[in-house]
């Protein structure tokens, strides 16, 4: 399975919405939110510009996505907004590659302290973030003190 990773494009938004809706909501719920987020028209609390989203692509089909933005929330520099991978591509390193792309973007924007909202009961997500150096911040939040460390372990 050959995957490429690149910045998300407007044409990727329907596929991104389909992937997000597999975990929660519907594509009709996610399409305007993703489009508005990327256009900087919808703003998570304390969000700052710029923002970025990356996709993993296999045979011209989006297999996974990650998005993030600069922030002031909880004294962080950036926030991982979403990460989702199609079930058939999970446990193959796709999420790790996506996380590295976003970490490179954060580093290029001098954003090292990064937070992520994650349900306390979502043990798979919490274990993934912890494996990559995130620590508990609050019951619903984890953080990296320096996300660039995942790029150079």
Image: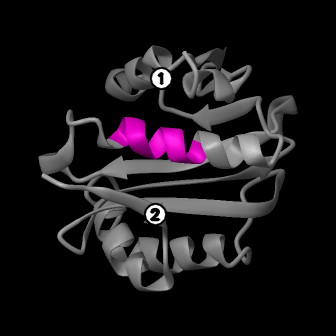
Please tell me the numbered disc located at residue 120: 1
Picture residue at 38% right of the left edge, 27% below the top: 122
Picture residue at 19% right of the left edge, 55% below the top: 2
Is the residue 95 above or below the residue 10 in the image? above
Prevalent SS, magenta region: helix
Residue 36 in percent (x, y) is at 63, 77
Secondary element type, mark 1:
loop
Residue 23 in percent (x, y) is at 30, 51
Q: Nearer the viewer, mark 2 or mark 1?
A: 2
**Which numbered disc flags the more N-terminal residue, 2 or 1?**
2
Gap between marks 2 and 1, in whole Å?
A: 30 Å
Residue 60 in percent (x, y) is at 23, 75
Residue 51 in percent (x, y) is at 70, 62
Mark 1 neighbour class, 10 Å CA radius: few under 14, some 14 to 19, many 20 or more: some
- Viewed as shown, does residue 71 lie left or right of 63? right
Q: Quadrant of the C terminus?
A: top right
Display coloring: one colour
Picture residue at 37% right of the left edge, 70% below the top: 17
Secondary element type, mark 2:
strand
Picture residue at 56% right of the left edge, 24% below the top: 150
Magenta-drawn segment: 95-102
Q: Which residue is mark 2?
A: 6
Instruction: Between residue 141 and residue 71, name the one nearer to us.
Output: 71
Is the residue 21 above or below the residue 85 in the image? below
Q: Quadrant of residue 18?
A: bottom left
Instruction: Between residue 48 and residue 133, name the one nearer to us.
Output: 133
């Amino acid at each position: 399975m050959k995957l490429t990773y690149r910045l998300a494009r407007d044409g990727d938004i329907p596929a991104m919405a389909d992937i997000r809706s597999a975990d929660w909501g519907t594509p009709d719920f996610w399409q305007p939110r993703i489009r508005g987020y990327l256009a900087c028209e919808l703003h998570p609390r304390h969000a700052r510009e710029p923002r970025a989203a990356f996709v993993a692509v296999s045979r011209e089909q989006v297999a996974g996505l990650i998005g993030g933005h600069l922030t002031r929330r909880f004294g962080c520099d950036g926030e991982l907004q979403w990460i989702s991978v199609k079930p058939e591509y999970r446990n193959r390193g796709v999420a790790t590659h996506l996380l590295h792309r976003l970490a490179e973007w954060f580093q290029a924007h001098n954003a090292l302290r990064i937070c992520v909202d994650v349900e306390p009961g979502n043990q798979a997500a919490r274990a993934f973030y912890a494996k990559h150096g995130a620590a508990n911040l609050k019951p619903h939040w984890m953080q990296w003190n320096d996300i660039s460390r995942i790029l150079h372990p």
